[in-house]
Amino acid sequence: MANLYCIGICGTGMGALAGLLKAQGHAVRGSDAAVYPPMSDKLREWGVEMLEGFAAEHLQPPPDKVICGNVVRADNPEAVCARALKLPTLSMPQAVAEYGIGDKHSIVIAGTHGKTTTAALVAHLLRDAGLDPSYLVGGALVNVPESFHHGRGDYFVVEGDEYDSAYFDKGPKFLHYRARTAVVTSLEYDHADIFASLADVEHAFARFFSSVRPGGHLIVWHGAHRARALLAEHAGDQRVSIYATSPQPDAQACMRHYRSTPAGLEFEAEIGGTSLGPMQVPLWGDMAAANVLAALLAARDAGVNTAALRRGCKTFAGVKRRLEIIGEVAGVRVVDDFAHHPTAVRLTLQAARTRWPGARLWALFEPRSATSRRNVFAAEYAAAFAAADCVVLGSHARLDEVPLAERFDPEALAATLRTRRVDACALIEPQAIAAHVAAASCPGDVVLILSNGAFGGLQGLLLQALAKVARPVPKVAHAQ
């Protein structure tokens, strides 16, 4: 077993990797600029040593290898020290490939949207079928203690991101995983901080297709037109399956029918012309339907039979921060969701409509990601948020890092939405957002908090603010 040191250990991905390495029996320690919960609590629970701040002396005694998160810059004191000591240094995806995947059959879930839910469902289907897969998922799973597992089985399920790997490893993360089964759920422009254009993103995915092992399986959504266009040139002798949420002449898998109900999706999947029969899964909306079909194909690739697929879908509990109900106060339901790209916002709002039909729908949005802090998707955000009844647009501390001419403008977007008869406003502070929503919401409303970060603790602030507002609550049964 190795002695491993992780720089940037409190990041979601790095922390989960540290936990996986510890579960394998390695000695693991690491540092971060600030050791903060919830990851610090989990690392302590797993027995991983944490050091506050970055300092050269932290690398004494020298570890066998250093693993570097992609937020770490070349001038980080520990990165400088590792180079001076000539310590072998890996990016996070290199470490996943070396210590996690190894000789296992890698199932890599890639795409602009839906990676976490699809990967989590694949891992659940394999685990429920008794295959004991290893996995590393980029989100917390509901009713499962960890987002990773060191299994004894032959499969490793992992999300494949097109983002670069480390300061010394600028290639996309998913290239390291040498997928045997590769899923592409979607392909859109994203990560505006490192990709100048959609063509650059397409180039990354073309490389991903080429990296799939000979004889492997490429599973691509029919609606990912750009990804499908890349297949002819960049797929080699891999098997290709196209999946669609409605029958298509060029799709090998489809849903004959599906409907999104308050209880979840009810559907009949068909693969290779054979129906899997009626199935249910507690997920909502069109994006979820596509993700489920992708997961079924990947799980079938691992030999999971139809009865196990049907049982696994029904028992899947989902992923935190995906239409996750975090509380109901004074008749107002508060829901947390990770959506931040305009397509994800649009599809999440659509899914919420099917889960809570007839409810007045609020969308509270934090422009936190590198792409959402820019105005590249101004028109698309206006179209997406028009599906809500009430919208509150927040701000972010790093918004000012973007040049004014390229910056996301909450006030301008709110004004545009008001012309579309959406009750919209822009507020900077999370406390002000919480106070506004608590005062203006009514029993029966559903409030979606949309962010890929903490949104300044808005979730807790809103629940507290709602608790202070006295209002009669009608006796109405809410679908969960």
Image: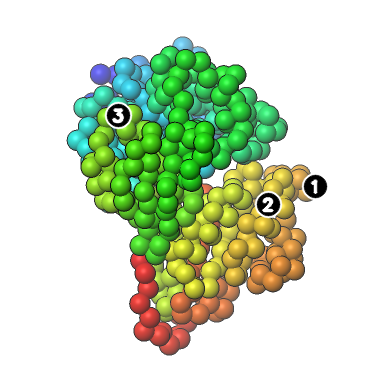
Observer-nearest residue: 44 or 446? 446
Residue 20 lies left or right of residue 130; in this view the side is: right
At which x and y percent is residue 420?
A: 71, 67
Identify whether 129 is placed above or below 417: above
Name the amino acid, label 2. Glu
Horizontal and vertical percent position of residue 73 = 57, 28
Residue, disc 2: 380
Q: Amino acid at mark 1?
A: Ala
Contact? badges 2 and 1 (CB < 8 Å)? no
Would you say 16 lies left or right of 70 here? left
Q: Residue furthest bottom?
A: 472
Could one spot residue 410 in this view of the protein? yes
Mark 2 vs mark 1, foreground winner is 2
Q: Nearer the viewer, residue 347 or 167?
A: 347
**Residue at (26%, 34%) from the top-left corner?**
304
Report the Cα–Cα distance between label 2 and label 1.
18 Å
Mark found first going from the N terminus, 2 or 3: 3
Q: Is residue 262 above or below residue 172?
A: below
Mark 1: which secondary structure? helix
Measure the C-alpha gap from mark 1 to mark 3: 49 Å
Q: Give the crowd class for mark 1: few <14, some 14-19, many >=20 residues within 10 Å.
A: few
Q: Which mark is residue 302?
A: 3
Question: Mark 1 sits on what residue?
Answer: 405
